[in-house]
Amino acid sequence: MGYEEAIKGEAQRTEFRKAEKRYKLYKALRGSVHKAKLTDDLPPTDLTNVIDFSNIKHDNLPLNVSIAKLDYPCPWPVFTITQRPGFYFLLGALDIDEQFGLIKESLGSFPQPPSRTNHTEFYGPIHNLWSAHAGPNRQHLVQLSNGTWEFMEEAALPSKSKSIAASTLVKKLRWATLGLQFDWSKRNYDVSLPHVKIPHKLSQLAKELARPAMQKGEFHAEAAIVNYFGSDDMLGGHLDDMEADWSKPIVSISLGCKAIFLLGGESREDTPFAMFLRSGDVVLMAGPARQCFHATHISSMWKGLEYKQFFGVWIGKKMSSTASAFIC
């Protein structure tokens, strides 16, 4: 979409949609759609009102936001936004070793069956996707005569076979579900689908991170969604509202490139707060904040940083036989 086209219809958009458009890096096309280039006169994205929790100064905050730093006994700063009760921002909660460990698992072990991914419905269970992509020999997923798929080296591909490169599958990987499996068509958890428990280390990390938002008891994670983003990707405005008990938090662990997180209100007409998310930051949403629309945007502005992708790890707690709460 060209820049001029992108700003058309601004008056008809909701306040949340306006913010999504504002922080998107528009691409004006020159010639073929396959040869899109950024124009030199593309207006820069205005980041004036984006909250930066790593550099909080009350004289540089947007006029309509009030931020407090909690006096909470944990090794990382915890911030809240007065206008969004139940929202917590944990600045740099994961150290570099924890980040790289989770990134490695997000690519290697987390997408392994019985965990489902966005590829499962078409290809069935895919084992060792990252190994097939990162190994010394180019691998393709090939459809066999019985209709199943398996990896083969490129040099050994049968003639006229239906196949797709492992590298392409990795690029198109958008989500993986851990623990209880989420049925995207029904928007609930299907306890009948095969699954294994969330890795103990991840579950313990989630319990520790969730503490600032837990009024009582401990958090026990039973489900997780890992979202994978490339540059210019966006997880559009949505609610995580499939749980029976909204007092339990969503815990969102950010890994990879810098991103912009939008935190709206209960209506899409509420103007959202925009804030930077960096690798190692964690967001908690509990109670009233569970009813707030939110979105994540990865922009071409962040190309060239230390990571090439951004991962959102969403972890959840089963609240009844049919519903689960996220921690993201």
Image (cartoon, grey):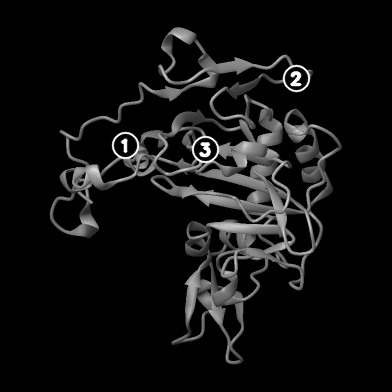
- Sequence-wise, which precedes: disc 3 or disc 1? 1
Image location (x, y in percent) of residue 268: 42, 44
Identify the residue at horizontal 84%, vertical 34% (top origin). Answer: 216
Q: Which residue is mark 2?
A: 75
Identify the residue at horizontal 39%, vertical 40% (top origin). Answer: 299
Badge 1, how many Cα within 10 Å: few under 14, some, many 20+? some
Q: Which residue is mark 1?
A: 22
CB within 8 Å, label 1 to label 2: no
In the rendered image, which quarter is residue 132 located in?
Answer: bottom right
- How far apart in space, not on screen, are marks 3 and 1 (Cα)? 24 Å
Q: Is residue 322 left or right of residue 150?
A: right
- Sequence-wise, which precedes: disc 2 or disc 3? 2
- How far apart in space, not on screen, are marks 1 and 2 (Cα)? 34 Å
Three-letter code, disc 2: Pro
Q: Is residue 53 above or below residue 59?
A: below
Q: Is residue 212 above or below residue 29?
A: above
